[in-house]
Amino acid sequence: MKELRFRFILIVLAIALSIYLLYPTYVDYQNSKDIQKIVQAKRSELLINNPSYSEDQLNKVLLSIEDSIKLADPSIREARLKRVKLGLDLQGGMRVVLEVNTVKLLEKIANNPDDDFTQVLESAAKEAAISDEAIVDIFARKLEEKQIRLSRYFGSIREDDAKILSDLRTQTDDAVTRAMEIIRNRVDQYGVSEPSIQKQGERRVIIELPGIAKEEEARQLLQGTALLEFRLLKDPEFTINVMKKIDETLAGKTIEETDSALVNDSTKLAADTTSQTDTTADQQLSAEEFAKQHPFFAIALINPQGQSADAYVKADDKVKVQRMLNRTDVQKVIPNNVEFAFSAKPIGIQEGQDIFVLYLVNKNPELTGGVITDAMANIDPSTSAAIVSMEMNSEGATEWARITGANIDKRCAIMLDGVIFSAPVIRGKIPGGRSQIEGMANLEEAKLLEIVLKAGALPAPVEIIEERTVGPSLGQDSISKGLNSAILGYVLVAIFMVIYYRKAGTVAAAALTFTIVFIMGILAGFGATLTLPGIAGVVLTMGMAVDANVLIYERIREELATGKTAKASIDGGFSKAYSAIFDSNITTFFTGIILYQFGSGPVQGFALTLMIGIVASLFSALVIGRLLFDFMLVKGQKISLG
């Protein structure tokens, strides 16, 4: 038995890990059932109490109830994030293909376009519609045919056509990249779980939004122009006072009490709040007591040693803070000309959670992104730090000089779609519309900010050229049929193996069970998405899994026919079957790699589960199957092969 111990421990660990990774999926399934029961009960109750409700009104109320249940318990969201993810075809939602209108881009950046320009561009657009060639290349070729230089409309007269063409290609590619960045940011803010956003060809972007129910909102989300704004941050003293009012309102104190406290001792208030109400009494409070007396500062933390009033919020508490700020009584104590906004990305990790920054900014922007004409990420030669340089048009340059001159040593937030990407300090008046943004961790982060800055004035509109909606009921039907096919395939294969190979067939059926557990565990562990073609890959894997067992068992039969003992026959059967098993599985695995590399969504889903299935089936057949045979031999059991 000692020689089996290592393999036994290895198998137990693999099974335990798979079950651990799959447990959140089970929890999420149970949570969904419980929530649906509550929602159905509320539905009946609402229909009795409000018989005049329309179906739309009823659905809105029920959706609000469902959202509140999910937000109230963080474990529900945590289980959902760690579950086996479902693709669009299983969960329902929207699939949209957007095309970036590069024709409009060329029209916008052209210098003094005339009739020749318009005719050539229209002709190029018609040809691009039925060709895979980039419109910039078609346009340049048609101009060359007419013996018109590109420098007539783009760049400067001193530049050659090759340089101008290269710049135009870069600008059109960048327009698609900026469109993707805008869409990704909007989708993330919208709260779509497991979105898929990928580029297709030269001008198209494919977006899959699982679970989307409001189609019109999704269209506006994808086609709307990104809003870039420059807003001033409020002074730390002002911000702290507002936060103190919010904290005391949430703690149950009246507005009059709060105002009186602020008037009597505003200096002490700022100091107390900056140190998280660091009085002797508060130092002695337990975490629960502090959270009760200071509900806002318990989750929106202020750095006592910091010079700003930025609040730091854990990712799990962002929704909670937003709900606090949206309360009617809290809105009354927040001045009408300011609002809170979160950072676009986390600034660090604490206790395994991302940390976001909460800022207080002016509600009205000082400047919008329409004035940005160019932005460039590079390295500052004097400091070797990543920076972003930006340029504005004449109107923007004048305004920017006035704004920066009047707000030296203050901070200005760069906001896109309501979240803050950067909040640098204004060091001095900036004339000429040229300015520099510092504080990026690396050049990649600076490049991202460059794209964001350019995205404020999106030069090329996006158009929806294809749209498909998968309803939740159709998705549930796909899940049911997919699971039924997988179960039926498993049962038929297991029955065949048991009938044909008797006790050895039982070993194969047991190994097949573990194969399925391993596949699902790996999908959950790596955050892969299970699609309907993916289920087909699982079903195919079942046949391939027992294929290895068939090769081994037939080899064992041949060894037994020569008169060898059971142990010698099993050793010989496994060793002689290895080459055939590995050859067939490796070639199939390479095919899966090719399908995954060059295929699109459904093909990739099939290829992914197929590759995972091959690895899992080899482990089950060669390790688990062999262990079970060796265990039966040690116990002196007879092994029948039919």
Image: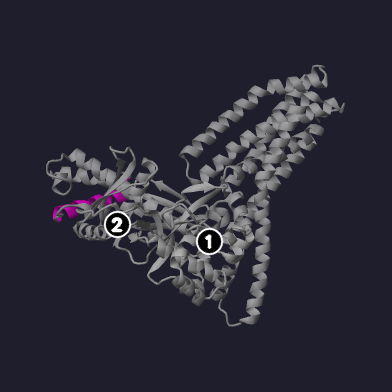
Quadrant hosting residue 578? top right
CA–CA distance in space, label 1 to label 2: 44 Å
Residue 457 is marked as 2
Residue 559 placement (x, y as % from top left): 77, 19
The percent position of residue 335, horizontal first and vertical second, equals: 41, 71
Relative side of 454 to 31, left or right: left
Residue 379 position, x and y percent, is 31, 39
Residue identifier under label 1: 277
- Total count of labels: 2
Query: Residue 559, relative to residue 418: is it above or below?
Result: above
Q: Which mark is residue 80?
A: none
The residue stretch that appears in magenta: 115-131
Q: Position of residue 441 (x, y in %)?
A: 40, 43
Q: Is residue 636 left or right of residue 210?
A: right
- Tell me the chief SS of the magenta region: helix
Mark 1 Cα within 10 Å, few/some/many (few <14, many 20+)?
many
Does 129 sit above or below residue 493? below
- Which amino acid type is shown beneath numbered disc 2? Ala
- Vertical comparison of 500 with 81: above or below: above
Please say whether residue 219 is visible from this viewpoint: no
Query: What's the residue at 59%, 70% (across, down)?
Result: 62
**Residue at the extreme bottom:** 52
Residue 138, located in which quarter of the rendered image? top left
User: Hey, what amino acid is under mark 1?
Assistant: Thr
Tell which circle, 1 or 2, labels the residue nearer the N-terminal end: 1
Along the line of sight, which residue is nearer the eye, 299 or 605?
Answer: 299
Q: Quadrant of the C terminus?
A: top right
